[in-house]
Amino acid sequence: MSLIKDVFTPDWLNRLGEAMQAPDFRDVVQQGDWEELAFKQRVRRIAIELNRYLPADFDQAATHLETIALEFPGLPGIVFPDYIEVYAPSDAWGRAMVALERLTRHSTSEFAVRRFLLDDQDRFLEVAVRWSQSSDEHVRRLASEGTRPRLPWGQRIPALIADPRPVLPILDDLLQDEALYVRKSVANHLNDIAKTHPELVIERLEQLGNHPHTDWILRHASRTLLKQGHPDVLKAFGLVTRGTVTVDELTVTPTLPIGGELAFSFQVTTTEPQILRIEYAIDYVKKRGTSQKVFRISERQVSEQETFTKRQSFRNLTTRVHYPGTHQLTILINGEAYATAAFDVEEETE
């Protein structure tokens, strides 16, 4: 299985060397500990080596990168915005913004812009507002993705985690965006905000029903709040239980090893047809105490009685390590617990 860091293939590095008129570029980049470097470390290595072959004048260097970026689209082209992040002098702030706007059209400047956002938030947000009104969807996405307070792989923005209100006008500008690429970013950004300031996302749920693109964004932006069973959010999406709903015949695998699978089934009965959000929560045993994670099974119309079956892997992952002990499974409907069952997880057998 190829790793993301392997996007910088020998052929790609050779082509970049040709574009830089540097025949030895690949050898210079790949010397030493190249094989041990992670993706972002490789990005920075390439950006630093680019500096050896670019003009000392930043404007000229940026112009050259803007020209050759056309030949290096996609994720590997992230090295060009990274160069701007590292080498833009403080007195070339405006030129750096122009370069990042141009370069994001071929790859993404979402990581590189964060240096400038952290240096001068007010000044940067003025630029981001203008980007949000661009005719280019890549630039509009940069306005949202570049200001996400908890961007994966990116520097966190403590000021916007503490108070995200300064960026809300940008997101509001994009709530009806035609591009799915942009809408996904806005939804993820609002979901970030929901983790610390749920009220700011809940306020925007009043706009449901005004536009299908807005509805899509707000639905995806509310995924964390829906998993938390937030009553105002459930109500906004019409997930309020009517009549009588019961969960019966919950059965689970009583014992399984780490690396095995939990199998379970249950029956849902409702006295009137309605849309139900059906989820399950597992209280995982950790080194100290337990930690609950919620998983969705379905959100659809349920009439009279239906049986649901599900399997959950207990294979160790980099993001989740399993421990032996008694775990608990809970069936949730519209955010409320309806049935629970315990099961034991044992050490993996030889």
Image (spheres, rainbow, N blue to C red):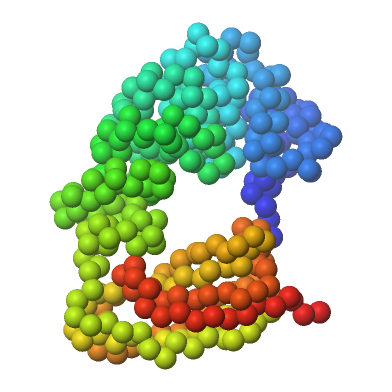
In percent of width and height, residue 113 lies at 48, 28
- Image quadrant assignment for residue 51: top right
Residue at 25 percent across and 89 percent down: it is 304
In percent of width and height, residue 316 lies at 67, 67
Q: Is residue 239 above or below residue 307?
A: above
Note whether residue 127 is visible: no
On the picture, is 269 further left or further right than 62?
Answer: left
On the picture, is 35 further left or further right than 310?
Answer: right
Foreground pick, 107 / 168: 168
Q: Is residue 91 above or below residue 146?
A: above
Q: Quadrant of the N terminus?
A: bottom right
In percent of width and height, residue 338 lies at 37, 78
Q: Is residue 287 above or below residue 191?
A: below
Residue at 36 percent across and 56 percent down: it is 225
Foreground pick, 123 / 177: 123
* Residue, far left: 210
In percent of width and height, residue 130 lies at 31, 26
On the picture, is 191 further left or further right than 61?
Answer: left
Residue at 68 percent across and 25 percent down: it is 48
